[in-house]
Image (cartoon, coloured by chain):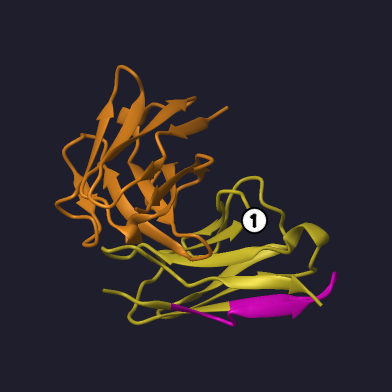
Chain colours: A yellow, B orange
Amino acid sequence: DIQVTQSPSTLSASVGDRVTITCRASQNISPWLAWFQQKPGEAPKLLIYKASNLQSGVPSRFSGSGSGTEYTLTISSLQPDDFATYYCHQYRSYPYTFGQGTKLESK
Amino acid sequence: QVQLVESGGALVRPGGSLRLSCVVSGLTVREHYMAWIRQAPGKGLEWVSYIGRSGRTLYYADSVKGRFTISRDTARNSVYLQMNNLRPEDAAVYYCVARVPAPDYWGQGTLVTVSS
């Protein structure tokens, strides 16, 4: 099975900060990596698919990059609505797996 | 507007059974891969099962294989998850999702509690 490890598990930041979350896979998954945002009590929301493609309707301050085994989600200027938990997700091969999540908190 | 509405979650004893339903509008289930993903309280996300466009392509996580069955009713535009021999570790919010493997449509979730 492909393991995906996110870091950090918790991130404290302020409005306006540039924020980066990393996801590392145990083998090459290029480009089959997605990022989701989840707020308490809500279903996850797709932000990025195929590593760098912005889902329709998602603000352009979100971006994804990476290849091979290492990927990043960047928020260029953090907004109040962005405090949430973020998950990466590999869909290169079965079983599909999610990272353990990164909780983005207000500093 | 696409909507996925789950139902069927409940409190059940270990060894019991439940059938989850997902009624879909705004999207035709026979045209997309559909799936169930679960999230235990305070935990991360886990793929449970999916069903392909043909209805013949099925996937189950090892943790549920032999106990859970995914199905669909194209006339009702719905997807189901029959869960048998439930264990405490199956307790979670179960989400119905569309357009696997990077699902962009999710239901609101239905809570399954397994406890004696």
Quarter containing the N terminus of chain B:
top right
Badge 1 crowding class, 10 Å Cα cut-off, few under 14, some 14 to 19, many 20 or more, is few
Q: Residue at x 41, y 39 (%)?
A: B9
Can you tell which quarter of the image residue A10 is in? bottom right
The percent position of residue A16, horizontal first and vertical second, equals 85, 71
Given residues A38 and B29, the one toward you in this image is: A38
Residue A11 lies in the magenta-colored region: yes
Farthest residue toward the front? B116
Q: Which residues are magenta?
A: A5-21
Q: Secondary structure at mark 1?
A: loop
Q: Check disc 1 and report the residue beneath it.
A: A40
Given residues B67 and A24, the one toward you in this image is: B67
Can you tell which quarter of the image residue A67 is in? bottom left
The chain letter under disc 1 is A
The percent position of residue A68, horizontal first and vertical second, equals 40, 79
The percent position of residue A56, horizontal first and vertical second, equals 61, 46
Q: In the displayed structure, would residue A32 be above or below residue A10?
A: above
Farthest residue toward the top? B75
Q: In the displayed structure, would residue B30 be above or below residue A68?
A: above
